[in-house]
């Protein structure tokens, strides 16, 4: 009996030693932090990429690498003292149109007009005029930086640090051609080099979001693409896709793409078009906006490579309605298109459209955002876009905001959470997106 007990103790000791040795061995292995994805309808898997920690002075940023067929999220460490990764399959919309007296001699966009309703009877029952910064701005929230200028280098640096904190690897820059601006702003194309440089310092890539300026046609967009690639294509922050053919191409979003008919887009975006860009040095991945259901067929006929939904108000449009994303994704998979759902923390544009309260989506301390993010992940997308970093007019920003009360205004805020609440939520979900993609392979 004693001998049996001794043998049992020896066996137990050896087993314990084996488990301990195995665990110590596993701890010495480097984790495989990059990943690939084989989503439904995809037929190509790239090799896993290895993430390694480097000192901030040694950071080297690889191009973003996603394409219809595979994705390879590159994770870059920009802090030597802690794990501080960013993800190039999380894109965030960014606006450069703000101005202040210190930099621009006047407020720009913060003093936005109250847009009247198209029905005179409805318009008559709502406030009119324009906002008067700095106490009264064209937003339901108030920025921590105050009504800033997009030209302020300190503001740009703060924005890039916040975007990095949120783990969003690609800034999608709202872009107008040189000398052109939206109806309420001033030209900002001259600021793009500063944005590119600031983004590069934080290992962030920049993609372009071509806006619907007056006179935009397929031919003018051809010229825009040439301008963008000629001027910024060699910059270290310029974002590109890697195709399963091995080609690396820029990725461009085209806002309100439906304003141009499919047959016109086809002249630019199909191989047989009269001024086709396909196969030329200016070829790219073109992503169109889907608003109505019929747009998915128009996008396919136009020769686009994918579609995105942009709007952060669930139910506002067919494209922005979470319940439709599965059907849109199925359509895209069947036609070799990229589907990029857009999610946001909430929506409230009544500071500029006082009659549009029915489209308001309350943040509910972040729960609306998390619901949107979960809806996006459920369709297994290659890329998720965030609407937005700083579209303050529509209340979709994740930029830091602070409580503020004036004689005439009581602004919304992020309380009981801190000003960086939505940056933290974005990082949390970006990391979750990474983990979910790993599961999709299993």
Image: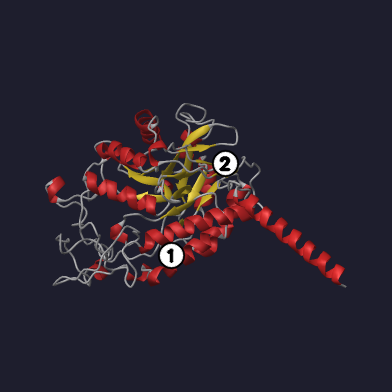
Element carrying mark 2: loop
Relative to 389, is 32 on the left or the right?
right
User: Looking at the image, is mark 1 or mark 2 earlier in the sequence?
Assistant: 2
Query: Which residue is under mark 1?
Result: 369
Query: Which residue is under mark 2?
Result: 49
- Measured as percent of width and height from the top left, residue 156 is found at 27, 46
Q: Nearer the viewer, residue 304 or 436?
A: 436
Give the number of marks. Answer: 2
Q: Relative to 220, does residue 415 appear above or below in the rendering?
A: below
Q: Quadrant of the C terminus?
A: bottom right
Asked whether residue 186 is in view, the answer is: yes
Q: Quadrant of the N terminus?
A: bottom right
- Measured as percent of width and height from the top left, residue 267 is found at 47, 34
- Measured as percent of width and height from the top left, residue 92 is found at 40, 51
Relative to 223, is 351 on the left or the right?
left
Q: Relative to 323, does residue 283 appear above or below in the rendering?
A: above
Relative to 161, is 143 on the left or the right?
left
Q: CA distance from mark 1 to mark 2?
A: 30 Å
Instruction: Name the image quarter holding residue 3.
Output: bottom right
Asked whether residue 343 is in view, the answer is: no
């Amino acid at each position: 009996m004693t001998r049996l007990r001794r043998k049992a103790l020896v066996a137990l000791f050896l087993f314990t030693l084996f488990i301990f040795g195995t665990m110590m061995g596993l701890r010495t292995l480097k984790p495989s932090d990059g990943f690939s994805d084989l989503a439904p309808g995809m037929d190509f898997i790239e090799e896993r990429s290895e993430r390694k920690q480097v000192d901030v002075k040694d950071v080297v940023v690889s191009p973003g690498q996603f394409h219809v067929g595979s994705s390879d999220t590159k994770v870059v460490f920009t802090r030597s003292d802690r794990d501080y990764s960013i993800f190039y399959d999380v894109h965030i919309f960014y606006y450069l149109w703000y101005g202040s007296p210190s930099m621009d001699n006047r407020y720009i966009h913060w003093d936005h007009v109250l847009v009247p309703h198209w029905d005179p009877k409805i318009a008559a029952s709502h406030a009119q005029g324009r906002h008067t910064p700095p106490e009264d701005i064209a937003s339901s929230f108030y920025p921590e930086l105050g009504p800033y200028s997009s030209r302020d280098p300190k503001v740009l640096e703060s924005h890039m640090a916040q975007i990095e904190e949120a783990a969003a690897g690609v800034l999608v820059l709202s872009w107008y051609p040189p000398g052109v601006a939206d109806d309420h702003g001033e030209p900002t194309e001259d600021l793009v080099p500063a944005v590119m440089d600031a983004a590069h310092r934080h290992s962030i890539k920049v993609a372009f979001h071509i806006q619907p300026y007056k006179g935009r046609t397929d031919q003018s967009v051809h010229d825009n693409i040439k301008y963008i690639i000629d001027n910024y294509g060699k910059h270290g922050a310029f974002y590109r896709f890697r195709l399963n053919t091995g080609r690396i191409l820029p990725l461009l979003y085209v806002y309100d793409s439906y304003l141009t008919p499919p047959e016109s887009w086809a002249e630019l975006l199909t191989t047989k078009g009269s001024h086709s860009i396909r196969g030329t040095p200016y070829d790219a991945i073109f992503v169109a906006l889907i608003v109505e259901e019929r747009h998915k067929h128009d996008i396919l006929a136009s020769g686009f490579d994918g579609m995105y939904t942009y709007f952060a108000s669930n139910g506002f449009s067919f494209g922005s309605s979470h319940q439709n994303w599965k059907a849109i994704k199925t359509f895209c998979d069947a036609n070799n298109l990229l589907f990029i759902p857009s999610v946001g923390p909430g929506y409230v544009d009544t500071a500029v459209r006082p009659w549009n309260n029915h489209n308001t989506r309350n943040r509910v301390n972040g729960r609306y955002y998390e619901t949107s993010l979960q809806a996006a992940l459920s369709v297994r997308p290659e890329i998720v876009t965030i609407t937005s970093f700083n579209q303050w007019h529509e209340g979709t920003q994740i930029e830091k905001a602070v409580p503020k009360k004036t004689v005439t205004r009581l602004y919304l805020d992020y309380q009981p959470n801190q000003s960086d609440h939505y940056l933290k939520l974005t990082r949390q979900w970006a990391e979750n997106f990474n983990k979910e993609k790993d599961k999709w392979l299993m």
